[in-house]
Image (tube, rainbow, N blue to C red):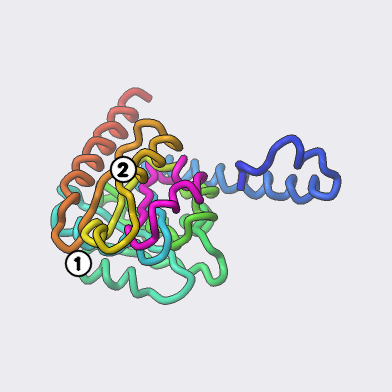
Amino acid sequence: MAEIINEDIKNNPQLSHKVTVIEKILSKNNAMADEIRKTFDEHKITCFNMMSSPGSGKTTTLENLADRLPYKFGVIEGDLETSRDAERIRNKGIWSFQLQTGRACHLDAGMVKHAMPEFPFDDVEVAFIENVGNLVCPASYDVGAHYNMVFVSVPEGDDKIEKYPVMFRKADIVVITKADMVDYFDFDIERAIENARKLKPGVPVVLLNNKTGEGLDEIIEWIKQKREEHLNSLKNQ
């Protein structure tokens, strides 16, 4: 959303009021996100925002991380309806809080703030926010995380990276899921990696097969690296 607010739009009298409202909404959201991030910082918790289309495998990845990630973690789930994803996470013995957004196609900081009173700050080291499945809106709203994980599945096609550039510019890591299906779909791995790095130079790209666990160790190593990076930044404050 913020990316479309340029001088041409601001100078259009038909749109100027709408742009002002959008700017106020984003400004309020960003302030609230900073509060959430500060709360995580105070408890030395590193937070990751997981974004993708519906069905890309975010929840399955979290289930697999529950078995192998060397950190205690909690999950804030976002969906329009149902608590199915949160229940799946709880079944793995992981604390999870379900946010139901109704018609909203994304989480924002105000929604995430509702989970804060229940969050087990003293019992976890890492937090994951599993955003609503959507490659558009979630990219425009800061939810108080420290890092963004963007997932794209092989069945979606490698063109999604170019079609939804705002999302992939925000990525601190790109995870290509359902890698075991690459032989059955027109998905060019090299082109996907190249396009991701055009939008975000140097971004790590991991191929993940949640059935076999191939690629999960790379994600875990990246999380460990970002966790250490976050803790070091707190020491320098």
Give the amino acid at mark 2.
Glu
- The span picked out in magenta is 144-169
Residue 184 position, x and y percent, is 27, 63
Locate residue 116: give its quadrant. Answer: bottom left
Q: Which residue is mark 2?
A: 190
Residue 49 position, x and y percent, is 39, 50
**What residue sits 30% from the left and 73% below the top?**
87
Residue 101 vs 67, above or below: the answer is below
Residue 88 position, x and y percent, is 27, 71
Give the amino acid at mark 1.
Lys
**What residue sits 48% from the left and 70% below the top?**
80
Residue 51 position, x and y percent, is 41, 54
Locate residue 194: give its quadrant. Answer: top left
- 36 and 206: which one is in front? 206
- 116 and 175: which one is in front? 175
Q: Which residue is mark 1?
A: 92
Residue 97 vs 51, above or below: the answer is below
Question: Which residue of the protein is positioned furthest toward the right in this rendering?
Answer: 13
Q: Quadrant of the C terminus?
A: top left
